[in-house]
Amino acid sequence: QVELVESGGGLVQAGGSLRLSCAASGSIFSINALEWYRQAPGKQRDLVAFVTSDGSTNYADSVKGRFTISRDNAKNTVYLQMNNLKPEDTAVYYCNALVEVVPGTEDLELWGQGTLVTVSS
């Protein structure tokens, strides 16, 4: 069974930092795109950042310059370093991955269980 397990959420004061991790486990041939989403109470789930298999990254305008996404292919893990956090960053953060389980087959889309980030003012 292939799954994503997240960690690193918590409570932090405005201006502080947190680092989220998302590790893929199970029988995996390769991982293509890795993404972080977030969903605030009463709002839709929005894309925060993604990193492609070749390391290209992109960010939502609201987090540019503050968040950094990175991946460790040897560990099948993606990270989200969040600096200068603001109360509006409060949300449940989810990782998403496109995983190739068997070479040459269609990618499997996986979601993590979500981790809560709360930023106090």
Image (cartoon, rainbow, N blue to C red):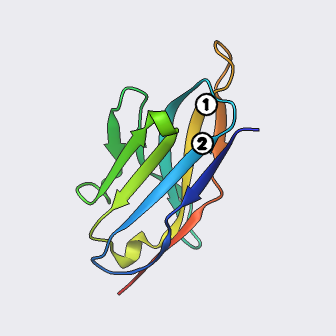
Q: Residue at x 33, y 70 (%)?
A: 17
Residue beneath disc 1: 99
Q: Farthest residue toward the top?
A: 104
Which residue is most to the left?
A: 65
* Amino acid type assigned to the residue bearing label 1 in the image: Val
Amino acid carrying mark 2 in the image: Ala
Q: Position of residue 50 (x, y in %)?
A: 42, 42
Q: Is residue 23 found left or right of 58 in the rendered image?
A: right
Q: Secondary structure beneath disc 1?
A: strand
The numbered disc on residue 57 is: none
Q: Quadrant of residue 81?
A: bottom left
Q: Nearer the viewer, mark 2 or mark 1?
A: 2
Helix, strand or loop at label 2? It is: strand
Of mark 2 and mark 1, the one earlier in the sequence is: 2
| Quadrant where the N terminus is found in the figure | top right
> Which quadrant holds the C terminus?
bottom left
**Which one is nearer the viewer's eye here, 56 or 1?**
1
Q: CA distance from mark 2 to mark 1?
A: 9 Å
Graded by Cα atoms within 10 Å as few (under 14), some (14 to 19) or many (20 or more), the crowding at tag 1 reads many
Which residue is the site of mark 2?
Answer: 24
- Report the residue at 31% width, 58% height from top: 63
Q: Is residue 16 above or below residue 78?
A: below
